[in-house]
Image (cartoon, grey):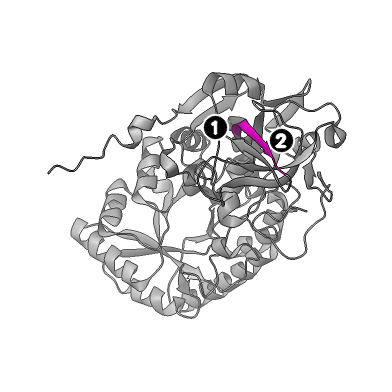
């Protein structure tokens, strides 16, 4: 069982794609791709939609992020279909993958967007989406952020503090506009996920405590340029169970009834995002099961329902391709040094996330292939924490192309230029077509804006 981001608690058993041996972990590539609709093996070669990974690696080089357009749209549509009985808006969480091509594909499909910075809003607008279908989350909105969002016609600010509420009113008054807001309520619900991506506990920096929410709503109602439109909650990411969502919803419903008693009527309820995905052997609740558990309570409210999925829409629509540059077997450890590194994909080092690493070409006999060894897949960065996977049973040769699956979310968006490494290119595939959607950075571009000291 993989423990990507350490989900805990009971979950539905899924067909395992792994074999744990004394030497290391074997992930069956064919069995894994059965659960990843964007990927499949044909004549032992790996394809994304109808394009071979070899074709992409040869044309665009490695490391390279590759996304399936259809896989993105399929998950978005699954959300839309599951909540079709309600007036709803699926607001894709831009932080998961903010490439303009990804955003434009979702905008054309009818998605709204969840953003956490002015830069993300500018991306959404550049991708052709309307700001009126955007919710602006985040704990540190500045005067400039709020001013830009209001001039663009933002759909809603998810307010996280009294200070922010006061600032939004001030900016709106200066612009002679009414600012649409909801309060992000922190319900103190345990999402049972990695502590770095838990957002709904009282120890987290996010939101206004459930106990204080009514009083803050009353303060908001008294402000001159504030329009109260909703209530918001987000308890964490990579949630594999529905129970934490239900617990958070129950607390919001309690508040909604209290608000009505005090004459404050809302137009929408926003349950945030955070639904988990299967990286290797996780057992996340399905979108359909998620909806079935929430629909009865949501239907009774009579409000428009917002959701903010990110990871679940794009994670398994993408892979990171990397080439084996050096094989370094030692008496204690075998290291496969690849051309991707922690600057390209930091999740394994940051969250202890376990992601599958599968070959571009299948070995003839899987786990029993002659030459199979346990390898640590590592990069060339000068850090011991620079690893992409550990103790993976693979048959490797220098020059092999590997695909790291589940890399469509929090991959490129969290990448950096550490060690003065250019960031990877990004490619989108649709059926048998492939297109570069972000050029690979050049080394020269990394210092183009720097200025030498002049004596």
Q: Are marks 2 and 1 in contact (CB under 8 Å)?
A: no
Residue receiving disc 2: 358
Q: Nearer the viewer, residue 41 or 331?
A: 331
Residue 302 visible, this orientation: no
Q: CA distance from mark 2 to mark 1?
A: 15 Å
Q: Is residue 24 above or below residue 36?
A: below
Q: At 36% across and 36% down in the image, what residue appears?
A: 126
On the picture, is 59 further left or further right than 121?
Answer: right
Residue 399 visible, this orientation: yes
On the picture, is 145 further left or further right than 327?
Answer: left
**What is the magenta range?**
321-330
On the picture, is 131 further left or further right than 249?
Answer: left
Earlier in the chain: of badge 2 and badge 1, it is 1
Check the image and name the residue furthest to the left: 455
Magenta stretch encompasses residue 352: no
Q: Secondary structure at mark 1?
A: loop
Q: At 62% across and 60% down in the image, what residue appears?
A: 299
Residue receiving disc 1: 63
Q: How far from the left and from the top, in percent, is residue 70?
A: 62, 31
Q: Secondary structure at mark 2?
A: strand
Tag on residue 289?
Answer: none
Q: How far from the left and from the top, in percent, is residue 413?
A: 48, 44
Q: At 79% across and 43% down in the image, what residue appears?
A: 26
């Amino acid at each position: 069982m993989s423990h990507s981001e350490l989900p805990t608690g009971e979950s539905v058993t899924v067909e395992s794609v792994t074999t744990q041996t004394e030497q290391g972990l074997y992930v069956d590539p064919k069995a894994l791709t059965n659960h990843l609709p964007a990927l499949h093996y044909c004549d032992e070669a790996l394809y994304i939609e109808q394009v071979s990974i070899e074709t992409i690696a040869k044309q665009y080089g490695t490391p390279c992020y590759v996304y399936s357009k259809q896989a993105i749209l399929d998950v978005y549509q699954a959300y839309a279909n599951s909540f079709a009985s309600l007036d709803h808006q699926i607001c894709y969480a831009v932080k998961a993958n903010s490439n303009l091509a990804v955003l434009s594909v979702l905008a054309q499909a009818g998605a709204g967007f969840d953003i956490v910075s002015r830069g993300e809003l500018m991306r959404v607008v550049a991708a052709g989406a309307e700001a009126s279908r955007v919710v602006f989350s985040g704990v540190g909105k500045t005067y400039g952020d709020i001013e830009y969002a209001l001039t663009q016609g933002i759909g809603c600010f998810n307010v996280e503090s009294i200070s922010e509420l006061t600032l939004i009113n001030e900016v709106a008054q200066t612009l002679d506009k009414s600012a649409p807001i909801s309060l992000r309520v922190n319900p103190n619900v345990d999402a049972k996920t990695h502590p770095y991506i838990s957002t709904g506990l009282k120890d987290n920096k996010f939101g206004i405590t459930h106990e204080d929410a009514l009083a803050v709503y009353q303060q908001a109602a008294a402000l001159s340029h504030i329009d109260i439109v909703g209530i918001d909650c987000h308890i964490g990411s990579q949630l594999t169970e529905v129970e934490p969502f239900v617990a958070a919803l129950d607390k919001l419903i309690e508040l909604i009834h209290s608000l009505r008693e005090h004459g404050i009527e809302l137009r929408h309820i926003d349950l945030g995002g955070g639904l988990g995905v299967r990286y290797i052997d996780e057992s996340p609740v399905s979108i359909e099961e998620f909806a079935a558990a929430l629909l009865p309570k949501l239907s009774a409210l009579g409000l428009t329902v917002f959701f903010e999925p990110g990871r679940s829409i794009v994670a398994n629509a993408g892979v990171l391709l990397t080439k084996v540059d050096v094989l370094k077997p030692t008496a204690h450890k075998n290291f496969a040094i690849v051309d991707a590194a922690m600057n390209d994909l930091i999740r394994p080092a940051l969250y202890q996330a376990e992601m599958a690493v599968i070959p571009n070409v299948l070995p003839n006999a899987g786990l029993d292939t002659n030459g199979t060894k346990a390898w640590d897949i590592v990069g060339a960065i000068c850090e011991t924490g620079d690893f992409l996977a550990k103790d993976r049973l693979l048959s490797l040769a220098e020059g092999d192309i590997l695909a790291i699956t589940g890399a469509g979310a929090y991959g490129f968006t969290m990448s950096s230029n550490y060690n003065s490494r250019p960031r990877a290119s990004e490619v989108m595939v649709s059926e048998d077509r492939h297109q570069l959607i972000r050029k690979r950075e050049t080394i020269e571009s990394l210092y183009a804006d720097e200025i030498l000291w002049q004596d």
